[in-house]
Image (cartoon, rainbow, N blue to C red):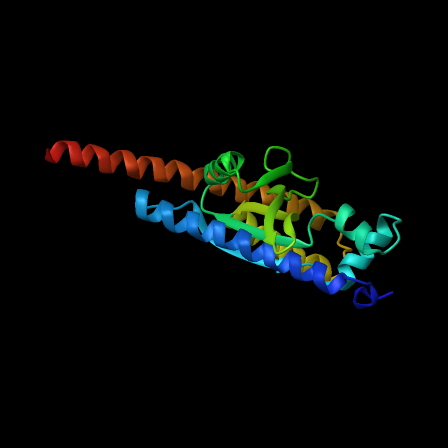
Amino acid sequence: MELKDIKGWQRTIHEYRFALRELETKVMILNTEWKLRDGYSPIEHVKVRLKEPESIINKMKRKNLQVTEENIVNHIQDIAGMRIVCAFVKDIYHIIDHMKLRSDLRIVQIKDYIAAPKPNGYQSVHLIVQVPLVLSDGTRWVYAEIQLRTMAMDFWASLEHILYYKFDKRVPPHVQQELTDAAKAAYELDEKMLQLRREIIQFAEEEEKSVV
């Protein structure tokens, strides 16, 4: 079965597309506001994507569910996806704390792979959220996934993805261990850069006081 054959699917996929635009607009406004107010935004860059039809169908099969519009909407929560890349780990949690306070966003689930990395070393925080989509016949809360990671984590994840798919997800055990070690090194780099930032800010403040 192809998704295009499912009655009502075209309307449904447009709802995910619209919800993703709504979410992207919220984040871009937030990014601009923080830059204007504080001179600094924790958001480095943002990427969005809609899950491919083949991936949706394969996921339904893995869940042993019939491929229907209702099942897809109720059981797949990452059709609309956003990745927010930050400079520092603390920025990730700052953004999450802000999102928890928003009335125009519902946080359904938080998976913290920074506090508890995956066995392969993968680190990121995944949020399952619901975005309100105001339509002519009412408001629908559409599921979306937000992934938050640092630039170092994003670099690692991108290369890990390339390696796994190039070799059909089969790599020697020692390579798997080296990938895990590389993920730890990426985290240590994040911590080192954060420490340097603190030192630079402290130095700048002391310089300003001495001038006064």
Q: Residue at x 55, y 57 (%)?
A: 21
Total numbered circles: 0
Q: Quadrant of the N terminus?
A: bottom right
Q: Residue at x 59, y 37 (%)?
A: 114
43 with respect to 105 (left or right): left
Residue 90 shows up from this direction: yes
**Looking at the picture, how far across and down is residue 211, in whole percent?**
11, 35
Q: Residue at x 62, y 56 (%)?
A: 136
**Looking at the picture, how far across and down is residue 157, in whole percent?**
61, 52
Q: Is residue 159 above or below residue 99?
A: below
Q: Quadrant of the C terminus?
A: top left
Q: Residue furthest left?
A: 212
Q: Residue at x 59, y 44 (%)?
A: 183
Q: Is residue 54 above or below residue 27?
A: below
**Looking at the picture, how far across and down is residue 30, in whole percent?**
43, 47
**Looking at the picture, how far across and down is residue 102, in whole percent?**
51, 38
Question: Which is more toward the observer, 196 or 69?
Answer: 69
Q: Residue furthest front?
A: 137
151 with respect to 212 (left or right): right
Residue 168 shows up from this direction: no
Question: Which is more toward the observer, 147 or 128?
Answer: 128
2 with respect to 21 (left or right): right
